[in-house]
Image (cartoon, rainbow, N blue to C red):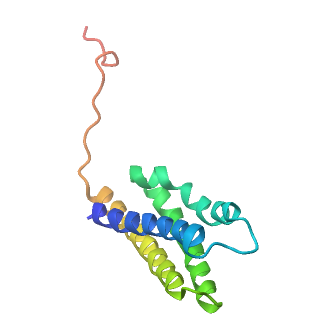
Amino acid sequence: MSRFWSGIALAGYFGLFGLLLLWYAWLEPPDRLPTALVLILLVGPLLTPLRGLLHGRPYTYAWTSFLALFYFTVGIFNVAGPMVHPWLAWLEIGLSTQLFLGAVLYVRVRSQERRTAPVRPAAVPAAIEPRKR
């Protein structure tokens, strides 16, 4: 079940990543700031959890949920302001919500799976075994 929630979170992550690139590089490039600066400030933070998300690390999923809240807030801010394409802001809100829910539920399900998993006895290496007399 954790793979399902990981897939949901990754779909929200890559959707949000692609949306922001498309939005600020092609559909509505910023007028007052350089496009590269806006992309670094808005898309750059999404690059930090990429490796941990792809490796399925629960700690990374946990703090990525906080990152998703930032993009949710940015989406709410953009909906309130004048825009040429307001559906982009609504899509950002939806994808950040998907990322948040997927990440939080992945951590929850993964911790339950680890708790209920059978414990395997540790193998003792031959070099550490006690000597027979």
Q: Horizontal and vertical percent for residue 95?
A: 45, 75
Toward which corner of the image does residue 127 lie, by quadrant?
Answer: top left
Looking at the image, residue 43 sits to the left or right of residue 131; the answer is: right
Query: Farthest top residue?
Result: 133
The one of 129 and 74 positioned closer to us in this rendering: 74
**Residue 132 visible at all:** yes
Which quarter of the image is occupied by the C terminus? top left
- In the picture, measured across the screen, residue 73 lies left or right of residue 9, that is right
Please, is residue 85 above or below residue 68 in the view?
below
| In the rendered image, the vertical position of residue 67 relative to residue 81, given as above or below | above
Q: Quadrant of residue 47?
A: bottom right
Nearer to me, 115 or 12? 12
Image x and y of residue 124, in percent: 29, 26
The residue at the point 43 percent across, 63 percent down is 14
Percent position of residue 76, x then y: 59, 86
Q: Is residue 62 left or right of residue 39?
A: left
Rendering coords of residue 1 (x, y %)? 25, 65
Q: Is residue 66 visible?
A: no
In the image, 77 versus 18, the foreground residue is 18
Q: Residue 85 appears in which quarter of the rendering?
A: bottom right
Residue at screen point 72% across, 75% down: 31
| Residue displayed at 56% across by 69% down | 26
Q: Is residue 49 above or below residue 88?
A: above
